[in-house]
Amino acid sequence: MVPQRPGPVGAALTARRLFLRLLLIVAVAAAATAGVSLTWVAIGGGPLGVHGLVALSLGVLGTVAMTWTLMALAFKSSREGWDDRPDDPDRP
């Protein structure tokens, strides 16, 4: 029987997960950019130049990053009790 090597642990596992999440975000942004670009050409718009593709990519990436950040903040505030009512029921 061949001994199996243990998988990554600790900081290496965290870095790997972060890398995979960032890779997923970039893949989603690339797919969205390609979809918008193809839709633009399909509806009769002119072909996008390099500057148009760069601007579209940055816009999509910024939107995805902002959405991800705001959702993370919403979950964080919910977990930490920031959304709970105060202890005094008489105060609105």
Image (spheres, rainbow, N blue to C red):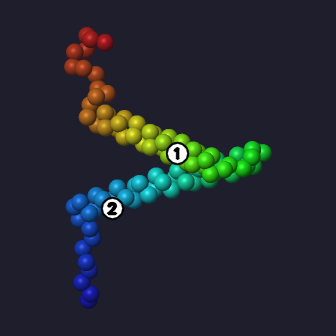
Does 58 sit left or right of 91 as displayed?
A: right
Q: Give the image quarter of residue 87.
A: top left
Most distant residue in the right direction:
44
CA separation, marks 1 and 2?
Answer: 24 Å
The part of the image, by quadrant, that contains residue 72 is top left
Identify the residue shown where x is 24% and y is 20%. 86
The amino acid type of the residue labelled 1 equals: Leu
Q: Is residue 60 visible?
A: no
Q: Is residue 31 visible?
A: yes
Residue placed under numbered mark 2 in the picture: 16
Residue at screen point 28% across, 58% down:
14
Measured from the top left, where is residue 91 in percent x and y? 27, 11
User: Please, is residue 39 above or below residue 87 in the view?
Assistant: below
> Secondary structure beneath disc 1?
helix
Q: Nearer the viewer, residue 61 or 52?
A: 52
Q: Amino acid at mark 2?
A: Arg
Q: Which residue is mark 1?
A: 58
